[in-house]
C-alpha cells in the first residue's frame, strides 16, 4: 500500500513538473493560439460554397455553384532566401510574432542549424513585399520564405546552418516540384529595396540543385550582346538598371557591388543568361 501511494505521489509530481515545464518553455503559447484562429478563419473561407466575396457574374444574378470532385491545393513555386538582419534567432521569432511588424516567414534557420516553422507552406507569409522577378509581382502568394539568422554584415555561415537549409530545400523542392532556377534571394526580387542575403554561399547551394550557377569555363559574349535584356531574361526587374546589376553581382559575383558590369561580369552574365533562356 505504501509503495502504491509513493508511486502515485511520484506520478503526480512528474505530471505536474511536465505541465509546468511545458507552460514555462512555450512562451509563444498566446501567438500560437492567434495562428490557429487565423488558420481556422482561412479554412472557413475555403469551405464556403459558393465562395464569399467572389462575384463572378457582372449582371449580379444569382451565383451558381457546382462543386467539382477534381481539385488540389495551390503550391509554392519559388523559394526566397533572406538574412534576418537581426542579432539572433530569438530576436527574429519575437519580431515575427508581433502584429505591428506585419512581417513573417515560413521558416527561420538558426546559426546552430535549428529550423523553426512559423507559417504552413500552403499559407502566405509576409516576407517578400513589393518587387518583381520575371513577371511575378506577388511573390508572397507563390513562394516559401526562408530567413537565415544573420545580421547581414558577416560572411560567416555555419556548416550547421547551411546543412539544415539544404535539407529543408531538398524537402521543399521534391514536395512541390520547385524548378531549380526558382531558388533566389530577396535582393534578386526587390533589388531597389533589399540587400539580402548578403555574402551568401549561392554556389554551394547551386551545386546541390538549388538555384543556377555559371560554368567554370566561360566564353566571350558576341559584340552585340545586350546585357540589359540578359538581366531581364534571367528575371531581374531592370527598371532601375543599377539596382538590378548590383543585385546580380551580389548573387553571382560577390566581390564588388558597384552598379556597372565589368568585362568578367559580362562573361558570367552571358553564360547564365543562356541557361535561363
Ligand atoms: Zn529579406
Image (tube, grey):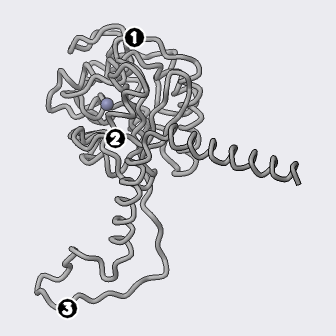
**Mark 3 surroundings: few (<14), some (14-19) or many (≥20) residues within 10 A:** few
Would you say residue 226 is visible in this rendering? no
Crowd band around label 1 with a 10 angstrom C-alpha radius: few (<14), some (14–19), many (20+): few
Instruction: Tell me the residue that label 1 is attached to.
Output: 154
Mark 2 or mark 1, whichever is nearer to me: 2
**Sequence-earlier tag: 1 or 3:** 3
At a point 25% along the width and 26% down the height, the residue shown is 194
Nearest the eye: 72 or 24 = 24
* Residue that carries the numbered disc 3 in the rendered image: 62
Q: Is label 3 in a helix, a strand or a loop? A: loop
Position of 57 relative to 215 (above/below): below
Image quarter for residue 187? top left
* Ligand 1 location (quadrant): top left
Residue appearing at x 36%, y 72% in the figure: 44
Q: Position of residue 270 (x, y in %)?
A: 36, 23
Q: Is residue 162 left or right of residue 152?
A: right
Amino acid at each position: 500500500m505504501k509503495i502504491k501511494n509513493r508511486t502515485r505521489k511520484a506520478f503526480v509530481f512528474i505530471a505536474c513538473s511536465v505541465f509546468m515545464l511545458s507552460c514555462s518553455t512555450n512562451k509563444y503559447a498566446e501567438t500560437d493560439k492567434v495562428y490557429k484562429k487565423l488558420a481556422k478563419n482561412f479554412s472557413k473561407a475555403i469551405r464556403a460554397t459558393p465562395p464569399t466575396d467572389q462575384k463572378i457574374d457582372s449582371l449580379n444574378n444569382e451565383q451558381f455553384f457546382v462543386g467539382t470532385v477534381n481539385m488540389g491545393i495551390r503550391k509554392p513555386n519559388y523559394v526566397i532566401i533572406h538574412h534576418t538582419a537581426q542579432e539572433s534567432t530569438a530576436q527574429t521569432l519575437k519580431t515575427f510574432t508581433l502584429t505591428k511588424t506585419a512581417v513573417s516567414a515560413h521558416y527561420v534557420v538558426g546559426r546552430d542549424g535549428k529550423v523553426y516553422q512559423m507559417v504552413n507552406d500552403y499559407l502566405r507569409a509576409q516576407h517578400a513585399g513589393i518587387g518583381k522577378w520575371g513577371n511575378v509581382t506577388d511573390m508572397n502568394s507563390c513562394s516559401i520564405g526562408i530567413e537565415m539568422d544573420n545580421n547581414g554584415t558577416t560572411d560567416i555561415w555555419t556548416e550547421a546552418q547551411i546543412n539544415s537549409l539544404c535539407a529543408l530545400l531538398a524537402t521543399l523542392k521534391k514536395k512541390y516540384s520547385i524548378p531549380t532556377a526558382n531558388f533566389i534571394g530577396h535582393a534578386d526580387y526587390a533589388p531597389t529595396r533589399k540587400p539580402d542575403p548578403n555574402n551568401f554561399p549561392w554556389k554551394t547551394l547551386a551545386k546541390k540543385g538549388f538555384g543556377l550557377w555559371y560554368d567554370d569555363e566561360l566564353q566571350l559574349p558576341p559584340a552585340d550582346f545586350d546585357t540589359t535584356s540578359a538581366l531581364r531574361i534571367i528575371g531581374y526587374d531592370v527598371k532601375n538598371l543599377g539596382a538590378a546589376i548590383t543585385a546580380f553581382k551580389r548573387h553571382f559575383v560577390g566581390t564588388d557591388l558597384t552598379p556597372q558590369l565589368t568585362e568578367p561580369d559580362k562573361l558570367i552574365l552571358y553564360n547564365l543568361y543562356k541557361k535561363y533562356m
